[in-house]
C-alpha cells in the first residue's frame, strides 16, 4: 500500500524534507515529518531546474510552490490534486501580501549602534540557481575601514574589508559582496548592522511554461507520460501537447511528474 501524506501532490513536487524549517519560515507549508525525498530521473531534474533553479533556497521553494499550486487549483485538473489524499492545509491562496511585504531589504542595528545604514538598490533574484535570500553583517572598524561578512547563502560565506570616506557625516557607497547592491552609512567605530535581502523572482508561470516547452523533448515526454500513455497520463499528455492555455499545460506536466514521483521509493 502506498503511503500518502497531507498536501500529497505539493509534498512530492517539493520533494524536500521538513528539516529544520518551522512554521515561522516564510510561507512554509505542512510537510509530513516522515516524508523522505525521492531520487528523481534526469527528466524531472531538468524540469525542476527550470521551476526552482539549480540549488534553490527554502524561500524559493516556498514561493515557487505557492505559484505552482495556485496554477494546479485554477482548472478542472484540480480534481487530480486530491485523488490520492484529500487532506490539504495550504488553502486558501492568501499569501500575496505576505510575499509582497517580505521581498526587499531589512536592516537591523546591533545593540549600542547609534548610526544608520541604508541599502542602495533592490535585490535581484538569481533564478538560475534559485537563491533569493542573502545576509551580511557590516561592522565599522575605524575611521576608514568596514568589514562585511557574508553569511547567506552558505556557499557564498566570506569576509571582506572595504575602505570608506565620509562627506557630511555620510560614507561613500560601498558594494555588498555577491550583489549588485550597495550601502552607505552614518556612524562611528563599533557600529554594526545586519542586512538581509529577499529578492522577488521576476518570471511568471507563462515564462516558465515557455522555457519548458523549448527544453522538453520526446525522451522527456516518454519519462513523463509513458511510451504508450494510459490514463491518467493519456489525459496529461493530450493537454500538454494540445491545449492552448498555459495553466492547463503546466498543470498537466506537474501532475504527470507528481504521479510518477509517488511511485519512486524514498532514498
Image (cartoon, rainbow, N blue to C red):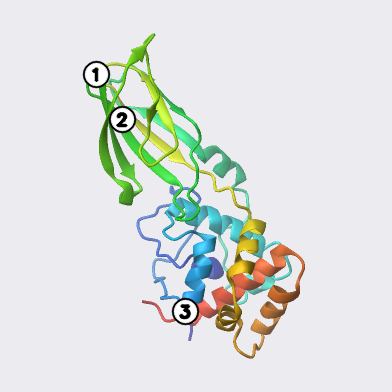
- Structural distance between the alpha carbons of marks 3 and 1: 58 Å
- When asked about the image quadrant of residue 101, the answer is top right
Q: From the image, tell me which residue sits under label 2.
A: 138
Residue 148 appears in view: yes
Q: Which residue corresponds to the image point at 67% horizontal and 86% vertical from the top-left?
A: 231
Circle 1 SS class: loop
The residue furthest top is: 168
Q: Is residue 258 left or right of residue 164?
A: right
Tell me whether the residue at label 2 lies in contact with that at label 3, contact meaning CB atoms closer than 8 angstroms. no
Q: Where does the image place residue 13, in percent across and percent down from the top left? A: 52, 68
- When asked about the image quadrant of residue 115, the answer is top left
Q: Where does the image place residue 23, in percent across and percent down from the top left? A: 44, 51
Q: Is residue 161 left or right of residue 90?
A: left
Q: Is residue 191 above or below residue 103?
A: above
**Counting residues from the N terminus, which is met first, the one under dot 2 or under dot 1?**
2
Circle 3 SS class: loop
Q: Which residue corresponds to the image point at 47% horizontal and 48% vertical from the top-left?
A: 26
- Structural distance between the alpha carbons of marks 2 and 3: 48 Å
Q: From the image, tell me which residue sits under label 3.
A: 3
Q: From the image, tell me which residue sits under label 1.
A: 189
Query: Which-is-in-front pick, marks 2 and 3?
Result: 2
Q: Is residue 2 above or below residue 36?
A: below
Tell me whether the residue at label 2 lies in contact with that at label 1, contact meaning CB atoms closer than 8 angstroms. no
Q: Which residue corresponds to the image point at 22% horizontal and 19% vertical from the top-left?
A: 142
Query: Which-is-in-front pick, marks 3 and 1?
Result: 1
Give residue 65's mark.
none
* In-front residue for pair 182/84: 182
* CA neighbours of label 3 inside 10 A, class few (<14), some (14 to 19), many (20+): few
Residue 232 appears in view: no
Q: Where does the image place residue 2, in percent across and percent down from the top left? A: 48, 83
Q: Where does the image place residue 234, in percent across and percent down from the top left? A: 68, 84
Amino acid at each position: 500500500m502506498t503511503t500518502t501524506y497531507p498536501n500529497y501532490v505539493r509534498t512530492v513536487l517539493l520533494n524536500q524534507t521538513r528539516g529544520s524549517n518551522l512554521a515561522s519560515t516564510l510561507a512554509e507549508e505542512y510537510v509530513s515529518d516522515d516524508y523522505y525525498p525521492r531520487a528523481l530521473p534526469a527528466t524531472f531534474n531538468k524540469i525542476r531546474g527550470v521551476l526552482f533553479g539549480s540549488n534553490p533556497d527554502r524561500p524559493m521553494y516556498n514561493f515557487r510552490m505557492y505559484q505552482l499550486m495556485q496554477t494546479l487549483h485554477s482548472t478542472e485538473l484540480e480534481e487530480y490534486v486530491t485523488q490520492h489524499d484529500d487532506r490539504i492545509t495550504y488553502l486558501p491562496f492568501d499569501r500575496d501580501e505576505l510575499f509582497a511585504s517580505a521581498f526587499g531589504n531589512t536592516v537591523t542595528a546591533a545593540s549600542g549602534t547609534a548610526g544608520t545604514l541604508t541599502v542602495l538598490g533592490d535585490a535581484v533574484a538569481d533564478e538560475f540557481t534559485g537563491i533569493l535570500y542573502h545576509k551580511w553583517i557590516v561592522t565599522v572598524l575605524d575611521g576608514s575601514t568596514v568589514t562585511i561578512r557574508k553569511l547567506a547563502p552558505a556557499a557564498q560565506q566570506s569576509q571582506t574589508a572595504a575602505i570608506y570616506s565620509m562627506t557630511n557625516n555620510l560614507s561613500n557607497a560601498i558594494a555588498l559582496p555577491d550583489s549588485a547592491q550597495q550601502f552607505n552609512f552614518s556612524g562611528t567605530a563599533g557600529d554594526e548592522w545586519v542586512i538581509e535581502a529577499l529578492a522577488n523572482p521576476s518570471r511568471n508561470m507563462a515564462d516558465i511554461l515557455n522555457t519548458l516547452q523549448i527544453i522538453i523533448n520526446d525522451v522527456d515526454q516518454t519519462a513523463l507520460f509513458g511510451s504508450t500513455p494510459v490514463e491518467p497520463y493519456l489525459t496529461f499528455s493530450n493537454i500538454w501537447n494540445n491545449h492552448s492555455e498555459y495553466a492547463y499545460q503546466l498543470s498537466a506536466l506537474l501532475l504527470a511528474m507528481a504521479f510518477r514521483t509517488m511511485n519512486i521509493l524514498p532514498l
